[in-house]
Amino acid sequence: MSTDPNVFQKTNAGRIVLLLSIVVSVFWYIGRITDIYRSAIVGAVFEILWLPMIGMLFLLPVIAVFSLIKEKFSFRSLHLYSILILALTLLSAFVFK
């Protein structure tokens, strides 16, 4: 392990979870700030992707927490940042309307 404090623990699982967290977050923010039903095609794509995105919104934090526990709560873990992104997304999607 490197002694450099700026180096993140970059595992493939961490990168995938972080990337999916960002995609889910962007999906929910776009859905909140734009009128997605203005175009029929965009509205249909949003409706098709809605169920998988809500599933990932609740499943990804669980995966990230288990991975963070496995990594012994390292602050250099990408899973921690995934949890923060998803927590903010959950708050903005369901609390702040």
Image: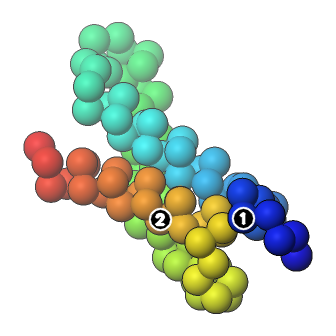
Callout 1 secondary element: loop
Q: Three-letter amino acid code at disc 1? A: Pro
Residue 5, label in figure: 1
- Residue 85 lies left or right of residue 69; in this view the side is left
Query: Label 2, on which residue?
Result: 83
Q: Residue at x 15, y 55 (%)?
A: 95
Indicate which label's residue lies in the foreground, 2 or 1.
Answer: 1
Q: Three-letter amino acid code at disc 2? A: Ile
Quadrant housing residue 94: bottom left
Q: Residue at x 34, y 35 (%)?
A: 29
Q: Is residue 55 visible?
A: no
* Residue 89 x, y percent position in the rendering: 34, 51
Task: Look at the image and tell me in which quarter the N terminus lies.
Answer: bottom right
Quadrant housing residue 86: bottom left
59 vs 86, nearest the viewer? 86
Q: Residue at x 28, y 20 (%)?
A: 34
* Residue 67 x, y percent position in the rendering: 64, 79
Q: Is residue 17 visible?
A: yes
9 vs 59, nearest the viewer? 9
* Residue 52 x, y percent position in the rendering: 49, 52
Marks 2 and 1, Cα distance to the nearest angstrom?
20 Å
Callout 2 secondary element: helix
